[in-house]
């Protein structure tokens, strides 16, 4: 038992990648009709992955344990081998992704998991790709994990079939193929100039380049930046996102809510790592990032006000969240970014809840009847689909409408940012830090620029309040003959748990903000030293873990 515990601790950083990968491959060996066994294996894999993410969070957040866990695959030292780096920022993102992943999986077991073949494997591969993108320490494997999660998302978007999903899927695939090509070109330029793709090694070598090479490196990183902006849904590269997300099945759309944050994460990671003291933000064009972020918020706000379908409103809310993050992290100020990370957690989980509620609310009005249609007409799928069409839709109880309505209005207030919820705490922290930093940390920008950010984000909150309250009143109060919502326990439990997490995020705001404030984004020294400083093939588990040397600065 002790040996197993030590082995799990030693390989903890790779478990969020390994568990869904192995489970997804195992599920391919089972026939689609063994859906109970597939559901049990998928749920177990997702919950174990979530437990590994929680353990990592406790590990890097504990002052007496390593703040940065470095895992070298095959014991190859960086920068020659594949390195996973679990610091506070990466682990926070992994946890958010797996929280939504677990909620979406439980929700899907109620109905969606059996409305088409190979759902579980695709879903687990998506989770594996998300965890890998957040944990990887080099650009090439970041590209690989991007492709894994995108390939899985293509299949998941089509899950359930229907013309609307196929049409949205074509746009989604085309846009992301172009973005992937830009990603590959950018990575190639960076490697040609520096001879490395390890992020820590790149941070060291970038500071030694001459003026001409530095200009070319900026060009390569700019191409990379375009790819990341597409992933994060920045305007005007985000026209596809509301249509795509609103067409996806509810549990798929919920996990899609965190996919835009991958682009935001990579921009934040590279901008704070490649050059110290915020100079890299100038490299990425911090002023352009700010204006793109504000334009994205305005575009998302207009979409929220103009939409009359709840799933499309949720899609535009995703843009408002991403745009706010882009505008805020462009400041490069550590205190402002700390508030932005707290906002990221609350807004991502809140939008995930809205996507899950969309189906329950629209089902109540009889709008979700045509949820699946055949896309391919092979005999095997047709046979499965005939069997799946008998799946019941849920159980209508007297209180279900009240509970669904309460969850809807709670998450609406959360996204608007009304006190005392975490949405308000996050925006207050961002605004306070921006004003105390003068121009919000936006380099040589005028001091009034911080007020523009505050004004746009505040107006977006008011617009969100109008749109969601209008939708809520129409859905729950305007129809006196509204039938009780048909909800299965598998659908109600994840919604209730995510709402409880949002409540906990507000109650424990202080420790949560302490965590985000200590993400170590103020400078790359700690990250570089952890990955390269004492790197060696003798410790597969990383610094401070059993069998490995202590991390830099740790007590012996």
Image (tube, rainbow, N blue to C red):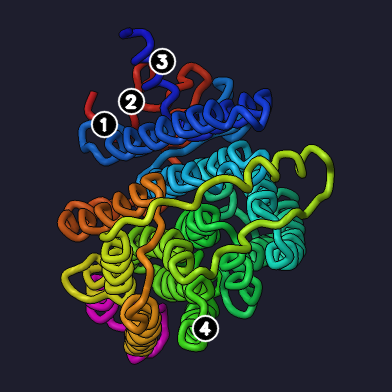
Q: Name the residue under label 4.
A: 307
Between disc 1 and disc 3, the foreground one is 3
Coordinates of residue 465 in the picture (x, y in percent)? 33, 82
Within 10 Å of disc 4 (Cα), the crowding (few <14, some 14-19, many 20+) is some
Q: Is the magenta stretch mostly helix, strand or loop?
A: loop
Q: Name the residue under label 3.
A: 7
Could you tell me which quadrant the N terminus lies in?
A: top left
Q: Distance between the residues labelled 3 and 4?
A: 51 Å
Q: Does the magenta stretch include residue 375?
A: no
Q: Which labelled disc corresponds to residue 65?
A: 1
Q: In this view, does 178 lie above or below 550?
A: below
Q: How far apart are marks 4 and 1 (CA)?
A: 48 Å
Q: Distance between the residues labelled 1 and 3?
A: 17 Å
Q: Distance between the residues labelled 2 and 4?
A: 51 Å
Coordinates of residue 479 in the picture (x, y in percent)? 36, 81
Q: Which labelled disc corresponds to residue 104?
A: none
Q: Distance between the residues labelled 1 and 2?
A: 7 Å
The numbered mark, 1 or 3, whose residue comes first in the sequence reads 3
The numbered mark, 2 or 4, whose residue comes first in the sequence reads 4
Q: Residue at x 31, y 80 (%)?
A: 477
Could you tell me which quadrant the C terminus lies in?
A: top left
Determine whether label 4 and label 1 are within 8 Å by CB: no
The numbered mark, 1 or 2, whose residue comes first in the sequence reads 1
């Amino acid at each position: 038992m002790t040996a197993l515990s030590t082995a799990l601790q030693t390989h903890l950083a790779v478990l969020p990648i390994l568990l869904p990968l192995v489970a997804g491959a195992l599920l391919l060996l089972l026939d689609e009709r063994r859906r109970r066994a597939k559901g049990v294996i998928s749920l177990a894999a997702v919950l174990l992955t979530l437990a590994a993410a929680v353990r990592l969070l406790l590990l890097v957040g504990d002052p007496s344990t390593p703040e940065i866990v470095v895992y070298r695959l095959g014991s190859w030292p960086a920068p020659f081998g594949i390195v996973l780096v679990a610091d506070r920022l990466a682990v926070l993102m992994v946890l958010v992704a797996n929280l939504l992943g677990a909620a979406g999986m439980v929700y899907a077991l109620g109905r969606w998991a059996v409305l088409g073949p190979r759902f579980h494997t695709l879903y687990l591969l998506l989770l594996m790709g998300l965890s890998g993108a957040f944990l990887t320490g080099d650009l090439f494997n970041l590209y690989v994990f991007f492709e894994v999660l995108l390939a899985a998302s293509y299949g998941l978007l089509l899950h359930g079939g229907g013309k609307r999903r196929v049409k949205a899927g074509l746009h989604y695939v085309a846009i992301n193929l172009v973005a992937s090509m830009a990603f590959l070109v950018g990575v190639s330029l960076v490697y040609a100039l520096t001879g490395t793709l390890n992020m820590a090694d790149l941070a060291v070598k970038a500071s030694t380049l001459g003026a001409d090479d530095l200009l070319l490196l900026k060009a390569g990183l700019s191409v990379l930046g375009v790819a990341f902006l597409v992933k994060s849904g920045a305007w005007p590269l985000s026209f596809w996102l509301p249509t795509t997300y609103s067409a996806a099945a509810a549990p798929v759309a919920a996990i899609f809510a965190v996919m835009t944050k991958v682009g935001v994460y990579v921009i934040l990671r590279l901008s704070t790592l490649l050059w110290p003291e915020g100079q890299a933000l100038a490299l990425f064009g911090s002023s352009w990032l700010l204006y793109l972020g504000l334009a994205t918020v305005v575009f998302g706000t207009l979409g929220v006000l103009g939409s009359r379908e709840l799933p499309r409103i949720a899609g535009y809310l995703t843009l408002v969240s991403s745009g706010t993050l882009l505008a805020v992290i462009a400041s490069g100020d550590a205190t402002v970014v700390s508030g932005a990370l707290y906002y990221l957690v609350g807004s991502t989980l809140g939008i995930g809840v809205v996507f899950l509620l969309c189906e329950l609310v629209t089902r109540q009005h009889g709008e979700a009847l045509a949820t699946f249609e055949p896309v391919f007409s092979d005999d095997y799928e047709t046979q499965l689909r005939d069997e799946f069409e008998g799946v019941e839709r849920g159980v209508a109880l007297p209180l279900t409408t009240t509970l669904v309505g309460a969850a809807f209005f709670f998450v609406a207030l959360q996204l608007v940012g009304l006190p005392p919820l975490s949405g308000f705490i996050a925006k207050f922290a961002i605004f306070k830090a921006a004003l105390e930093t003068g121009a919000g940390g936006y380099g040589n920008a005028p001091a009034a620029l911080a007020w523009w950010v505050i004004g746009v984000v505040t107006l977006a909150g008011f617009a969100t309040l109008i749109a969601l309250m209008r939708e809520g009143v129409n859905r729950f109060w305007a129809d006196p003959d509204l039938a009780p919502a048909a909800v299965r326990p598998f659908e109600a439990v994840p919604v209730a748990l995510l709402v409880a997490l949002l409540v906990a995020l507000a109650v424990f705001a202080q420790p949560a903000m302490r965590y985000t404030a200590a993400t170590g984004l103020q400078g790359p020294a700690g990250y570089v030293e952890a990955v390269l400083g004492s790197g060696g093939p003798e410790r597969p588990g990383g610094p401070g873990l059993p069998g490995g040397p202590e991390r830099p600065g740790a007590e012996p």
